[in-house]
Amino acid sequence: MITKTNFQMTQELKNWFPEHLGIISGEEAQKIFDTFQLAERDEINLRNLRDFCVMFYSKDRDDEKELIKNMDKVSAIVAVIDEKLLSIGAEA
């Protein structure tokens, strides 16, 4: 059972960024998986979460460095969600 809203879960990762630009480790993927409670989600819920994260991290940012970090973060989150979608037989 999912115990938090997508917003609350996103806030838990507010200060988290992948250690290396464009690459996430197994530990980082697991942190995303656990934070967003992906094991508990069905296809529709996974797609809604994916859309929410893309919209949330696509907000306008004045700081270009911050924007690049956020885009790397959303890319990592989307990759983990897409992997979960594929594992349940859905298209990513």
Image (tube, helix red, strand yellow):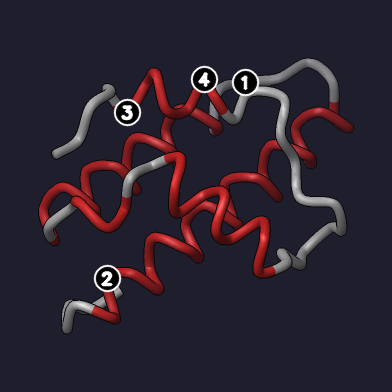
Residue 75 coordinates in the image, percent (x, y): 59, 55
Q: Amino acid at mark 1?
A: Asp
Which residue corresponds to mark 3? 6
Do tag 1 and tag 2 residues touch (Cβ < 8 Å)?
no
Q: Amino acid at mark 2?
A: Leu
**65 w.r.t. 49: above or below:** above
Residue 85 coordinates in the image, percent (x, y): 27, 71
Which residue corresponds to mark 2? 85
Q: Quadrant of residue 1?
A: top left
Is residue 82 toward the left or the right of residue 32 in the image?
A: left
Which residue corresponds to mark 4? 11
N-terminal of the pair, mark 1 or mark 4, is: 4
Which residue corresponds to mark 1? 60
Secondary structure of the residue carrying numbered label 1: loop
Residue appearing at x 66%, y 69% in the figure: 26
Nearest the eye: 44 or 57? 44
Secondary structure of the residue carrying numbered label 4: helix
Q: Nearer the viewer, mark 1 or mark 4?
A: 4
Q: Residues within 10 Å of mark 4 (few under 14, many from 20)?
A: few
Do tag 1 and tag 4 residues touch (Cβ < 8 Å)?
no
N-terminal of the pair, mark 1 or mark 2, is: 1
Nearest the eye: 74 or 12? 12
N-terminal of the pair, mark 4 or mark 2, is: 4
Secondary structure of the residue carrying numbered label 2: helix
**16 w.r.t. 12: above or below:** below
Q: Amino acid at mark 4?
A: Gln
The alpha-carbon separation of the residues under discs 1 and 4 comes to: 17 Å
